[in-house]
Image (tube, rainbow, N blue to C red):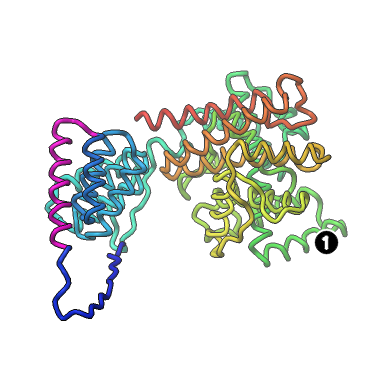
């Protein structure tokens, strides 16, 4: 995976005598400093040890010194620096098994288990007899629920124990099954059905203990149908053309609305209607911060919530792609409405856009520039001071940054990228807190003017997502 990068310097000399050999002197000094660092490490003087290792690599870079430095930085909980040092060790010596193990262990400490699997795999292939790398590899695989490597070099996901939320034992799955048994019409729920249209309220008489789950699922399904429909129209010319033909048949009264909706759902999974991101995030909040994702293709209809249209059959994670498509669409809409070349956004929104284009096989265009929570809030403040109002897209901007960042974080959590998920959750939490304090939304109760993203009910649901992440990290 890595190659040694060497640089050479040509030395010209007018003298016939050879230049003094400083390499041996430098390497000897570097080794002396490294051993001194080891002595400091043995007495648990971690700061002194790091200082000596830094002096060692400054005199002459060696893989051993960087590996020792990485080990010591882990003792100080400086994991990012530790990972960088371990990476440099493997660059200097790609066959250094201990350095690959150190990269794996540091990745584990940062909850980046997929990276840990990768580095331990390299170590075990370099030295099949190394018991440490094999043991740590098994532990990482167990954490993520992946099987052993297949003949083509890939690993197959089993049903993960923690990260993926949907299975028949999850409470909202049980609640939905009961609701379906009581209300047969749920099998033919209207495409893009929204609780705002009253469909859910007309159907449900379920007890309070199940109402929140079913309410959340109806919102999630409505948002997902809109997001999947938008994805299908965006990437499938055939689906787009067939949809227009169906619209023509409907306008000519050749088919009725019920048939139009059924055929649209079969073709595209849903209709691109309404605010997909808002419906998805509201459903997510009601479901205690959990995503509604199918585990496999062999599920019964009773636990398959979102229809996979034929035009998206090639997408393994089509629901994830639909979510980031909804985020990408909102980014583009805001850039146009605000007349901006680049939209100040969280790293989560930026990652969502990149995920979308990567999944459709295109290089991502530069649509956003990364911003801190304070910078994003200041952007809103400056625009409002310049005469803009909340009606000029700033409710949607807050929704994108807060809701979009949380949902991308949840996608990362489902992929086992727990540290990345946690960072995005922290960004979103800081952003909405700063914005609420700056614009006095909760204090004034100005939710209608400034957006439902500030409502406590949504924020409590998102905090449940953060708790879910903490629980997985704790395990």
In the image, what residue occupies the spot 29% across and 54% down? Answer: 88
Q: Count all numbered tags in the image, as a single digit.
A: 1
In the image, what residue occupies the spot 14% across and 34% down? Answer: 42
Magenta stretch: includes residue 463: no
Name the foreground residue: 43 vs 322.
Answer: 43
Q: Taken as a whole, is the magenta stretch helix, strand or loop?
A: helix
Residue 172: quarter of image: top right
Q: Residue furthest right?
A: 252
In the image, what residue occupies the spot 74% across and 44% down? Answer: 274
Residue, disc 1? 248
Vertical placement of residue 246 versus 424, above or below: below
Name the foreground residue: 93 vs 472.
Answer: 93
For the magenta stretch, what is the residue range? 23-46
Name the foreground residue: 14 vs 147.
Answer: 14
Magenta stretch: includes residue 39: yes
Image side of residue 61 versus residue 392, left or right: left
10 Å crowding of disc 1: few (<14), some (14-19), many (20+): few
Q: Position of residue 37 (x, y in %)?
A: 17, 41
Q: Position of residue 316 (x, y in %)?
A: 49, 55
Vertical placement of residue 117 versus 440, above or below: below
In the image, what residue occupies the spot 63% across and 48% down? Answer: 327
Image side of residue 178 versus residue 78, left or right: right
| Quadrant of the snapshot with the N terminus | bottom left
Vertical placement of residue 250 versus 163, above or below: below
Q: Position of residue 475 (x, y in %)?
A: 34, 30
Q: Secondary structure at mark 1?
A: helix
Q: Position of residue 96 (x, y in %)?
A: 19, 56
Image side of residue 176 versus residue 116, left or right: right
């Amino acid at each position: 995976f890595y190659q040694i990068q060497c640089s050479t310097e040509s030395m010209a000399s007018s003298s016939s005598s050879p230049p003094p050999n400083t390499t041996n002197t430098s390497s000897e000094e570097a080794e002396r400093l490294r051993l001194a660092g080891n002595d400091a490490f043995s007495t648990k003087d971690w700061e002194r040890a790091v200082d000596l290792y830094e002096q060692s690599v400054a005199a002459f870079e060696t893989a051993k010194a960087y590996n020792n430095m990485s080990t010591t930085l882990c003792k100080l909980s400086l994991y990012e620096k530790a990972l960088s040092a371990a990476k440099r060790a493997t660059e200097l010596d790609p066959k250094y098994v201990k350095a690959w193990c150190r990269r794996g262990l540091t990745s584990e400490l940062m909850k980046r288990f997929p990276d840990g699997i990768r580095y331990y795999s390299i170590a075990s292939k370099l030295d099949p007899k190394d018991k440490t790398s094999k043991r740590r590899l098994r532990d990482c695989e167990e954490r993520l629920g992946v099987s052993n490597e297949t003949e083509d070099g890939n690993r197959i996901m089993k049903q993960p124990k923690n990260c993926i939320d949907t299975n028949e034992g999850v409470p909202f799955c049980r609640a939905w099954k009961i609701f379906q048994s009581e209300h047969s019409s749920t099998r033919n729920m209207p495409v893009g059905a929204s609780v705002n249209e009253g469909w859910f309220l007309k159907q449900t008489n379920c007890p309070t203990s199940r109402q929140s789950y079913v309410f959340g699922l109806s919102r999630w399904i409505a948002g997902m149908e809109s997001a999947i429909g938008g994805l299908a129209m965006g990437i499938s010319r055939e689906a787009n053309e067939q949809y227009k033909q169906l619209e023509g048949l409907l306008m000519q009264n050749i088919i009725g609305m019920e048939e139009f909706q059924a055929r649209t759902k079969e073709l595209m999974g849903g209709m691109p209607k309404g605010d997909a991101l808002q419906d998805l995030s509201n459903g997510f909040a009601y479901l205690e911060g959990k995503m509604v994702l199918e585990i496999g293709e062999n599920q019964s209809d009773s636990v398959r919530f979102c229809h996979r249209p034929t035009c998206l059959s090639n997408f393994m994670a089509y629901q994830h792609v639909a979510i980031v498509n909804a985020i990408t669409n909102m980014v583009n809409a805001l850039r146009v409405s605000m007349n901006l070349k680049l939209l100040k956004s969280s790293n989560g929104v930026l990652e969502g856009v990149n995920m979308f284009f990567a999944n459709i096989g295109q290089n991502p265009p530069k649509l956003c520039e990364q911003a801190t929570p304070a910078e994003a809030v200041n952007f809103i403040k400056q625009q409002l001071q310049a005469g803009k109002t909340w009606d000029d897209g700033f409710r949607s901007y807050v929704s994108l940054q807060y809701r979009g960042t949380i949902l991308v974080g949840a996608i990362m959590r489902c992929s086992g990228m727990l540290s990345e998920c946690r960072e995005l959750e922290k960004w979103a939490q800081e952003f909405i807190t700063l914005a609420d304090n700056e614009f006095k939304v909760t204090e004034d109760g100005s939710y209608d003017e400034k957006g439902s993203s500030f409502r406590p009910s949504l924020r409590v649901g998102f905090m449940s997502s953060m708790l879910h992440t903490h629980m997985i990290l704790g395990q």
